[in-house]
Image (cartoon, helix red, strand yellow):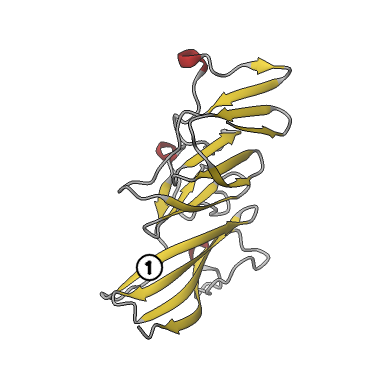
Amino acid sequence: VFSVMANKQCSIRESKNSNIVKCCAGLRHSSALTASGGLLVWGDDRHGQIVLNQIASDAATEASKINDGRREQHLLAPWFPPDEALLVDIACGARFTVMVDSHGRIFTLGSDNSHGSLGRDCTPSLKGCPTEIIPPLELHRDEYMYWQKVSCGWSHCVARGLRTTRNNEERTVLFFGWGRRDMGQYYAAKTREGRSSIDRAVRVYSMRTCTH
């Protein structure tokens, strides 16, 4: 059984053998990473924070009840990435959640993109749908990118990953930042207009060479 109190208004119980290995909190929502590599989200959904159909509806199951001023939400099932991938890391911003999966991809969940916090375009059809973001990287034919970790502030994010060759001879550690940047929250390359390129930037941090 997984139970948590959020803002003294919401009680969530999830009892489907989903062991929690990490949890994080946004402004009015929370997220958890399960041991099986899935995502659970609960709380305020006014900005698309919750995965579509993850919370049981009143009409269908009568699972949501008002008890002593607290709203009880019952989570149906964790969300998993496509292609049989598993989530390896999650983080919460103010009104969004960011995920990294075992294939090295980054996904964002939410609909408040006022500061570019989602790292992608946002349309009504994507509300409640975790969507992959594509960092603006130029990769050679023998290179691929593998994102590993992510961390979020109120309205900006930074992800850490490895750019490697297919034979793993060279590994370059990269940090990818996006979202609000008015206080220098992340490195941003300047365009000719003096502004950061679409509120997203990639910075090379260090280079390591494998000898085996």
> Which residue position is annotated with label 1?
145
Residue beneath the point at 40% across and 49% down: 86
Give above or below for 144 relative to 121. Answer: below
Q: Quadrant of the C terminus?
A: bottom left
Q: Nearer the viewer, residue 179 or 7?
A: 7
- Residue 101 in percent (x, y) is at 42, 54
Image label count:
1
Instruction: Tell me the quarter of the picture where residue 72 sits.
Output: top right
Badge 1 density bin: few <14, some 14–19, many ≥20, Cα 10 Å: many
Height in image: 110 above or below 162? above
Residue lying farthest to the left in this orientation = 141
Q: Nearer the viewer, residue 93 or 5?
A: 5
Which residue is at 66% across, 43% downward? 27
The residue at the point 72 percent across, 34 percent down is 7
Q: From the viewer's perspective, is residue 156 above or below residue 81?
A: below
Tell me if 19 is positioned left or right of 68 in this view.
Answer: left
Quadrant for residue 106, please give it.
bottom left
Question: Which of these two is toward me, 104 or 127?
Answer: 104
The residue under the point 45% across, 46% down is 122
